Amino acid sequence: MNKQKIGLFLMILAAFGLGISVILMRIMTQSMAMPPYQIGIWRFVLSGSLIWLISIFQKGKQKFTNNRHLWLIGLGAIFSVSGYTALFALNRMPSSLYIIILYIYPSLVVLYAKARKHPVPSLFWLALPMSFIGLVLTAYHPGEALVIDLTGLIFTLINAGAMALYLILSEKGFRGVDDRFLGTSWVITGAMLVSLVLIPIFGLSLPNSGREWGILLIYSIFGTLMPVLSMNIGLQLLGAARGSVIITVQPVITVLMAVIFLDEVLTGQQWIGGLLVVIAVVVLQLSPDRKSQGIQVNNSVPDLE
């Protein structure tokens, strides 16, 4: 299996994990008394503890040089900014409007890649608008009032900027890092450190039952560790520009999961929107990179051991 197919699978797996995180967040906010930002704190504290517990049993760990671990911790801090601003934005804005504004970030990543003369898919000009139109059709419900709250808009734009920055910098930050699991451990550590700093500010509530602990644990593993690890590997195989557009399937996956687990009804408009996003990803995957001067995408499959 070539690197593009593996990268495609990993980015879709990351999108699937992020979709799980959205569904679990909706379930937790409806069934738990814990405020959303405290759920976010538990998300990173648990995932950080789990990944280091697993890494203890790893053999032949890579030793980082030139303070690479500090770079990766910084990436984790950026990822946590994305996570927390999403929580604050969704408290103030309709989810459909949030999704539409948030997914400007793939365009930012592609524009950065072009400006830096990094490889970009030759048909990005077709895939980007197609995926965005598909997202609008998937997320927007006819008749829904799209009231823009200024604070919510600011949080959403920060969220989009943080996601774009994470994708761009992770391509560079993980270059030369063969042990992606250990690298991801440092990324999650960065997010956990931000969360620990927030505890004295916002406080920390304990889950009320074993069920709530179980949901938080699933959220930390499948909604955090799995997508972040998959994304970190996939971006090295595809590059940030291609990977950022592929991950736009996440809202489509979220809608489908809402139909399955939350008994929501999928409209014809949403089917069309989801189909457009899938077509955009296929077009992008079949589109070769434009040759340009600059940093090239890693052609080797990273070592996961």
Image: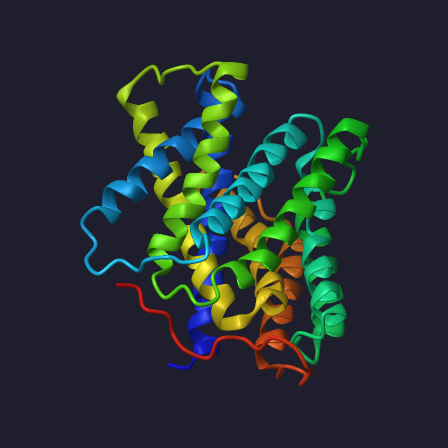
Q: Quadrant of the N terminus?
A: bottom left
Q: Is residue 14 above or below residue 48?
A: below
Q: Position of residue 175 (x, y in %)?
A: 48, 66
Q: Residue at x 37, y 16 (%)?
A: 206
Q: Residue at x 56, y 59 (%)?
A: 247
Q: Is residue 195 above or below residue 281?
A: above
Please name whichever residue, 107 or 26, is drawn nearer the observer in this view of the structure. 107
Please name whichever residue, 257 or 219, is drawn nearer the observer in this view of the structure. 219
In the rendered image, is residue 262 in sight? Answer: no
Q: Position of residue 117 (x, y in %)?
A: 71, 75
Q: Residue at x 64, y 49 (%)?
A: 267
Q: Residue at x 59, y 37 (%)?
A: 81
Q: Quadrant of the C terminus?
A: bottom left
Picture quadrant where residue 248 is located = bottom right
Q: How is the image coloured?
A: rainbow
Q: Is residue 299 above or below residue 35?
A: below
In the rendered structure, the answer to whether residue 234 lies left or right of residue 252 reads left
Q: Position of residue 75 (x, y in %)?
A: 53, 48
Residue farthest toward the front in the current orientation of the protein:
66
Please name whichever residue, 231 or 262, is drawn nearer the observer in this view of the structure. 231
In the rendered structure, the answer to whether residue 303 lies left or right of residue 236 reads left
Q: Position of residue 225 (x, y in %)?
A: 39, 46
In the rendered image, is residue 59 in sight? Answer: yes
How many circles with numbers are drawn on the protein? Answer: 0
